[in-house]
Amino acid sequence: MKVLTEASGSLVSASIIKTLKDIGIDVIASDITEFNAGAKLADDYIILPRISDELMWEKIIKILINENIKWIIPSLDEMLIGWSERAEDLRLQGFDILISPHETIQLFTDKWFTYNAFIDADLPTPKTSLEKKYSMVKPRCGRGSKGIEVTDKKVSMKGKISQEIINGTEVTVDCLFDKNGSPIYIIPRIRLKVIDGKSISALTIRNKKIDSNIKKLSSKFHFIGPVNIQCFMDNDKLYFIEVNPRVGGGMVLGWEASENWFDLWFNKIIHGKSIQPKPVKYGLRMDRYYSEIFSEVQNANI
């Protein structure tokens, strides 16, 4: 079975590719560059059109057909809306996508909608406004810390929110949901070290308040597959910040602390088999390092 992964040029894409290959999946990596490390690790590599290409989706669908792709695993924030709104049509054409429903993607790829979803589910969250009420200003739609600024000056709030600043320990909660939206795993990890928004060092922890709040959120909104949810812990207080409704490279710690989630998904969940989650290894630490990929390049004379 061929599975398409995105953003193979990312420094954390290797964990996704390797975890898929561990269960015998034929991984077709993709990105917009001619070559990258993920391309070398995968079974095959495809150059995808850029988002600025008006015919991008038509070209992508042709690629899926020509390459006989069966499953798509989105991991790029900018592509989530597009994949989710085409999910049903793609399934009719024989493709499956590991993604939450379109309504869920719409909510949780917009920070203003996310804030209101937290309020609706009665989850603690920082005060947020479409006006310049607070010093932290964020793009409504965006990933990581890109575009975030802290300022007391007036700024244009078009496409932005302002939010109160919360101090505390940053926690990412790696979750796996079945097709009906029931949580199988909820594994919090403290982000001990972050570079360019990527978790380099992390530690799994047990926290009953986080667990109960995630269950409360998922009872209101339909999540499917891997999702990571970010919050801050300040002593006994929790503040939920955002939801990333997609697989993430830092989830490798959650997989190591439990089991291979792709194995669970492709060999049990989609076939309706019974699931018995394994005990989670709390107190498991992950530290990342750079590793090199070598390949020969033709016509390297300058």
Image (spheres, rainbow, N blue to C red):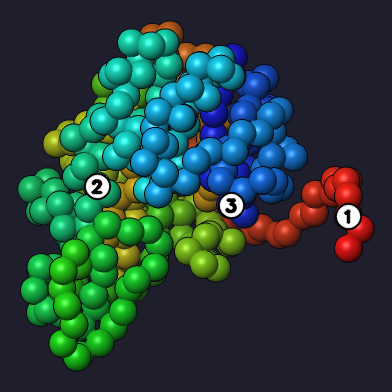
Q: Amino acid at mark 3?
A: Ser
The answer to whether 141 appears left or right of 61 in the picture is left
- Confirm whether residue 115 shows in the render: no
Find disc 2 in the rendering and name its residue: 108
Which badge, 3 or 1, comes first in the chain's sequence?
3
Find disc 1 in the rendering and name its residue: 300
The answer to whether 182 appears left or right of 246 in the picture is left
- Tell me the tag on residue 10: 3
Rendered residue at 26%/44% (across/down): 214
Of tags 3 and 2, the one toward the viewer is 3
- Tell me the tag on residue 287: none
Q: Amino acid at mark 1?
A: Ala
Please, which residue is most extreme toward the right here? 301
Residue 246: name its quadrant: top left
The answer to whether 257 appears left or right of 42 in the picture is left
| Badge 2 element | helix
Q: Amino acid at mark 2?
A: Phe
